[in-house]
Amino acid sequence: MKQKHAKKLEELMALKYKTQIDPIPMEDGGGYVAYHPELGSNIILGDGETEEEALRNLAQVKKEWFEIYLNRGIPIPTPNQDEPLEKYSGRFVLRTSRSLHRVLSTQARANGVSLNSWITQLLSSAVTGVHYEAQLDKCMSRFQNGLWNAIQAGALYTISESPPVTSAVAHLVPFTGMNERGKAA
C-alpha cells in the first residue's frame, strides 16, 4: 500500500462510526453480526460467536475494504456526526414502473431473498460506492497468480489441438497461454 494510502487508512480507521450488533438466529448458525450502518448494513460485516469476536472481525473486514477503496479511488463515507441516526425510521415509499418492479422481483427470487432485502443490497452498494467487481478482481488476481505459479512449476498442462487427437490419448503439452506476469497472452 502506498504511503499516502497508509496514512489515510490510519485516519479512516480512527473515525468513530456508529456500530450495531445484531444476534444471528440459531437456524442461521447463531452468533452475532456487527456492522456500521453509515457504511451500509450489507457491505462491511463482522460476525462471530460472541459480540467481541464480531467486533474484532468487523474491524479487520473494514480495514481490508478500506484498503481496496483507497487503491481504487472509491470514496469512503465518513461518519455523519451532524444528524442522529435515530431521526430516520429506515422506511420510505418508492414508486417505480411495473416493469422495473417485475425485474427486481425476479432478481430477488433468483437470489433467494425478499424484494425488500434485494433492493436494500442494491441501494447499499450504490450509496457506499461498493462494486462487487472489486471482490471479483481480487479473486481473479489470486487465481491468475496461482495459475502462473503452477505453470512455472511445470504442474499445469493443457490438451494440444495440434496434432489432431485421433485416439483416446490426448497429447499433453506445457500450457503457454500466459505472459511472464501471469496474464493471459
Image (cartoon, grey):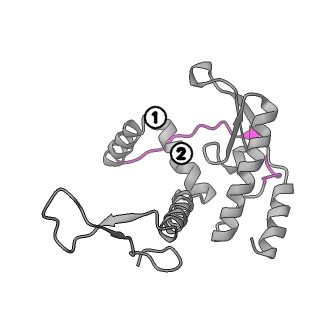
Image quadrant where one finds the C terminus: bottom left
Residue 144 picture location, percent across and down: 50, 66
Please give the name of the residue rendered at 24% of the width and 62% of the height, measured from the top-left corner. Answer: 170
In the picture, residue 50 is in which quadrant?
top right
Q: Is residue 5 left or right of residue 160?
A: right
The first of marks 1 and 2 along the sequence is: 1
Please give the name of the residue rendered at 42% of the width and 34% of the height, measured from the top-left corner. Answer: 112
Task: Check disc 1 and report the residue beneath it.
Answer: 113
Residue 78 picture location, percent across and down: 77, 58
- The answer to whether mark 1 and mark 2 are in CB contact below 8 A is yes
**Residue at the top extreme, as displayed:** 26
Between 162 and 61, the residue placed more toward the observer is 162
Q: 66 above or below 21?
A: below
Q: 118 above or below 26?
A: below
Q: Is residue 18 left or right of residue 114?
A: right
Give the numbered dot on residue 121: 2
Total labels drawn: 2
- Does the magenta-highlighted stretch encompass residue 96? yes
Magenta residues, start to end: 79-97
Q: Is residue 84 left or right of residue 127?
A: right
Q: In the image, what residue type sits under mark 2?
A: Gln
Give the numbered dot on residue 99: none
Residue 23 picture location, percent across and down: 69, 26
Tell me the CA gap for discs 1 and 2. Answer: 10 Å
Between 18 and 10, the residue placed more toward the observer is 10
Q: Secondary structure at mark 1?
A: loop
Q: Secondary structure at mark 2?
A: helix
